[in-house]
Image (cartoon, rainbow, N blue to C red):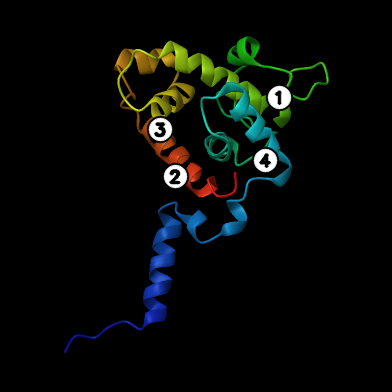
Amino acid sequence: MIRRAPVPAVLVTVIVISLLSGCSHIFDRSFEDVPADLVPVFQAAAATYGVLTAAQLAAQARVESSFDPRAVSHAGARGMMQFLPTTWAQFGVDGSGDGLADPLEPRDAIPSAANYEAHLAKSLADLPGDRISLILAAYNAGPVAVRTAGGIPDFDETRAYVARVHDWAATYSDQL
């Protein structure tokens, strides 16, 4: 005779496994919502630069910093969209209109990311493969790494980054 686990035990097991494997956003809607005040910023940046959708830009912010404008990485990347100082110096824009381009200000960082991705799209236009995945890989690993690899580099971090952004973009597509 085969003994079956009660349904609640099976459900608990699935939830625990999902949480441990990084799929917690499936069960916790409060962590997946884009901050309401930033929805129009993502939409405007997507419309202005025309490379990533608003949902894809929001997904990037989620993966980069969990929407934390004060985030700082071990490599020195700063802000919600995690700009290195050299990249910010070249691609940072004053999206807020206050006369200062600040990577810690989401209204500057979001359009700056879209601006940088428009540059990446042009610089990688001759490479084969999914355009958005190539741009995301270049945002994460750098355009030289993508060009050298002839596509998405075989870096675990970069491959996981691209997959996570695509996953979150699908989640955000209904909100944006």
Earlier in the chain: of badge 1 and badge 3, it is 1
Foreground disc of the pair 3, 4: 4
Earlier in the chain: of badge 4 and badge 2, it is 4
Q: Secondary structure at mark 2?
A: helix
Residue denoted by label 4: 39
Q: Secondary structure at mark 4?
A: helix
Earlier in the chain: of badge 3 and badge 2, it is 3
Label 1 neighbour load within 10 Å: few <14, some 14-19, many 20+: many
Quarter occupied by residue 83: top right
Foreground disc of the pair 3, 2: 2
Earlier in the chain: of badge 2 and badge 1, it is 1
Quarter occupied by residue 144: top left
Q: Tell me the amino acid under the disc marked 1.
A: Asp
Alpha-carbon span between mark 3 and mark 2? 15 Å
Alpha-carbon span between mark 1 and mark 4? 14 Å
Residue denoted by label 1: 108
Find out whether the residues at labels 3 and 2 contact each other: C-beta distance under 8 Å. Answer: no
Q: Quadrant of the N terminus?
A: bottom left
Numbered disc total: 4
Residue denoted by label 3: 157
Instruction: From the top left corner, tell me how far across and down residue 5 is, in percent.
Output: 31, 82
Q: Is residue 121 left or right of residue 97?
A: left
